[in-house]
Structure formats: C-alpha cells, structure tokens
Amino acid sequence: MLSKAQNKHIRSLAQQKFRDQHRQFVAEGHKIATEWLSGPAPITMVVATNQWLKENASLLTGRPNVAVIEAAESDMAAISQLKSAPSVLVVVSYPEQGLFSFDSGWCIALDGIQDPGNLGTIIRIADWFGVKSVLCSMDCVDAYNHKVVQGAMGSHLRVDVRKVDLAATLSNAGVPLYVASLSGTSVYDTRGVLPGVLVIGSEGRGVSPEVLGLGGQLITIPRIGEAESLNAAVSTGILCSWLVPR
Amino acid sequence: MLSKAQNKHIRSLAQQKFRDQHRQFVAEGHKIATEWLSGPAPITMVVATNQWLKENASLLTGRPNVAVIEAAESDMAAISQLKSAPSVLVVVSYPEQGLFSFDSGWCIALDGIQDPGNLGTIIRIADWFGVKSVLCSMDCVDAYNHKVVQGAMGSHLRVDVRKVDLAATLSNAGVPLYVASLSGTSVYDTRGVLPGVLVIGSEGRGVSPEVLGLGGQLITIPRIGEAESLNAAVSTGILCSWLVPR
C-alpha cells in the first residue's frame, strides 16, 4: 500500500523545485504508463489500483528497479493532479542528457512559451515529425510541468527537451535559423532549405530581441482571413510540415 | 453599478442551457472587447471597471443599444470565469445565421470535437485561412462555451460556426469531402484540389462511421517520427495550410 511518505513525495513533484531536486516527474493514465513501461523508460515507481496491476502484470515482470505500489482509489485521487483519478500513475527520472549538438537534423527552439498545453503539443509535434530536440529558453514553462507531460502524450522520452540560454546557444548553432514571424518569407516559398533550427516566439510577445538579433531568416504563414495571429503550437505544426519533410 | 439581477444573469450564461435560452454568450478581456466594440458586433452589454470605462469611452459613443455598466473589481471577479478578473466583459447576442451554403469556398466540419481549447483554436485557424464556416456535429463541445470563446480570440464573429446533423448535412454538400485520417493520400501530394469540406474527427475516436460512409477522400499528414497522433487543432492547421491557399 501507498505509505504516507510516498504519498507526500509524489504530491511534492507537482512543484518544479521538488522535481528538480529529485530529478523526477509524474505521468498519469493507462496510455502513457503502458507505453513507457513497454520500453526502456527510466520509471522508478508505478502506483496503481489493484485491478490495473492485475490486468497489466506482464508489463512489470523483468523490471526489478521499478517499485510497484498498489493504491486504493482514494489514494489515487489524493496523489493525482487530474480531475478524475487515473488507474495508474508513474514516477519517472529525468532522462539522461548528453552534450547537445545541432548536427542531428532539425531542432525546434522555443523563446518564452508560457502555456503548458502549447509546450506539450509542440513536444508531440516534434515527435511526429521526427525532430529530435526542443530547446527551451530559461523563461519557458517547465517541460516536466504536469500539463506539459500529459499534453505531450508520451513524447517526452523520445524528444530531447532541454532548457538553455537560448540566444547564447543559437549564436553558436552553425546551422540556419528560421524564425517564425508575422512577416518575412512565405513558408510556401521555402523550397530545398537546409535543416536547421525553427525558432518559435512566446504567445504574447513573439521572439525576443536577443534572438531576433542573431539574424535568422524570418518565415511567415501567409494570412488570408482576419485573425490577428495563430496559436503557437499550430504555427509550429504548420511550419514543420512545410520545412521538415523536404 | 451592477445589479443583483445582472450579476445573476451574466453568471447564468456560464451554462449552455441559459446561453441557448437567452441566445447570448460572454467574452472577457480588453483585447476581445475592444476588437468587437470597434466593429458591428451584436454586443448587448459591457461590464467594466471605472478605469476601463474612462480609458475606452470613445468605443462606447454612438452605441445606444449597448448597456454600459460600471462594476467594482470584486463584482468583476464574481461574474468572471477567468482566474484573474478582467477589466471588461461583454455580453454578446448569438450572431444571426441565414441558410447555410457550401458555395462559399472552403468549410471545416468537426465530427465530435470535445476539447474547448481545440474548438477555439480551430475557429481561429478558420479565421486565419479565410475559411468562412465551421460545421460542428451535435456532439461537439458548445461553440459558446467560455473556453471556446476565449481561445478563439475574437474569431467567433467572423466565422459562421453552427451545430448540424453532420452526416445528413455533408451527404448533400455537392462539393468534395477531404477527411483527415491516419492513412490515405499524403496532403503533400494534393495539388490543385477543388475547394470543399475538410472533415476533422474527434480527439479520441476520429471520424464517425456515418461520416466515413459518405466516401470522402482520406487525407493524411505523413508521420516521420513516433508520436501516435497529432493534436486535432494542429492537424487542422497543417491541412488548411496545404489545401486552402492553393
């Protein structure tokens, strides 16, 4: 059964300072748990109802490093950050990250994304288009925030997401920078571009002056109607579809 | 000042049954209020703080049919559905809708979209790409739900959003149907297609059998990486960018 200390530990991971201290985050729900348990994900703990454990016992065999804890539904509700308590929740170690390199194809760089739903969706977009890494400026929402993890639907462990001093990192990229903008070259006219970094600005204020100052190519999605802007995640998806598969 | 009856009326509009009964919905915040007040939007009431009314008085002159009500910040907090109370909130009549026609270019049809954030974002995408109408199946989230309105950021009054019996309506469309799917023709290979209806399925179960049975062309966004799916709004944006501007 779930101990008081375990209950407290899991609930503490709702806060970034405790996630960073323990280098662990939480993901909830059957879909993400079964997907990650089927692979080499660095899962340290599985907390689940008796029924879930019975039905998914095969996923847990041969995983001696995973602590498996049965919890009452009331305990699941207490430790869950979802409105309706899931049947399973996993505690996962931060993925190991080696030195970062711009040599492995396309990269997405996020300059101040605030909305956790947008960041989760963008990590999922990166995973869909085979983009291996997402660089986040220091003022982006934390990538292990609960809503980001749930929104990314499992993509966290396939995409290298890391927080960096964005302007400094991009200034040494050595590959082309393509900066999403409300003006610039139409993305429909970008044929045969070289792989590089797709830079997406924050929801409210776009790309910061420091990053704009690096002189990347401004790329725009031409507007036909009257909306003032497109959502940041939608823009990222559209730009990836035109740039990445070439 | 805001009366008790007005307070109660505005709060009642958080529920679809009262919105439908009064044919009115609520939109919050300076951006959307000023945008709509600058045009011919069917606004019936503006509730705002003293300071907002002072600073935006010019928007309210020559609008004799708009009731303007000053409210204390505590009243704004009581009637708002946002976490932090806005300085202004408007009550808007449902737009007048004439007979629907498929003759006016591209149309987006949503088959069971559940997430209000997705629906709001899709209405904004339609507005960006000049798509004049969004048809929603009867089981879609209500288009005047608070989160939908805030997510669409003002696009509700430029895009004709209506709830219909989707399969019956599409069966008489007389224009091509393009159905978003995990398999089918790559959207990158659809050159010179005729304007028609872009059909997007629900987040969980995709397009319903009734709508699939109408025999539209299945269109897919080829996957390069490993994510199981793309977000419904992101898919809509990508497909619009490839289909609509042609």
Image: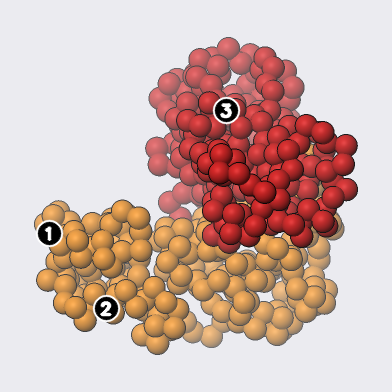
Chain colours: A orange, B red
Callout 2, which amino acid? Lys
For image coordinates 53% across by 27% down, the residue present is: B20
Mark 3, other Cα within 10 Å: few <14 / some 14–19 / many ≥20: some
For image coordinates 61% across by 32% down, the residue present is: B24
Mark 3 vs mark 2, foreground winner is: 3
Give the numbered dot on residue A70. none
Q: Dot 1 corresponds to which residue?
A: A50
Q: Is residue B37 visible?
A: yes
> Along the line of sight, which residue is nearer the eye, B237 or A141?
A141
Between the C-alphas of marks 3 and 1, the distance is: 48 Å
> Along the line of sight, which residue is nearer the eye, B149 or A217?
B149
B177 displayed left or right of B88: left
Callout 3, which amino acid? His
Mark 1, other Cα within 10 Å: few <14 / some 14–19 / many ≥20: some
The answer for which chain carries disc 1 is A
Q: Dot 3 corresponds to which residue?
A: B22
Between the C-alphas of marks 1 and 2, the distance is: 21 Å
Mark 3 vs mark 1, foreground winner is: 3
Callout 1, which amino acid? Asn
Number of numbered tags placed on the structure image: 3
Residue B146: percent from the left, percent from the top? Answer: 56, 44
The answer for which chain carries disc 2 is A
Q: Dot 2 corresponds to which residue?
A: A8
Residue A140: percent from the left, percent from the top? Answer: 59, 73
The answer as to whether the residues below labels 3 and 2 share one chain is no
The answer for which chain carries disc 3 is B
Label 3 SS: helix
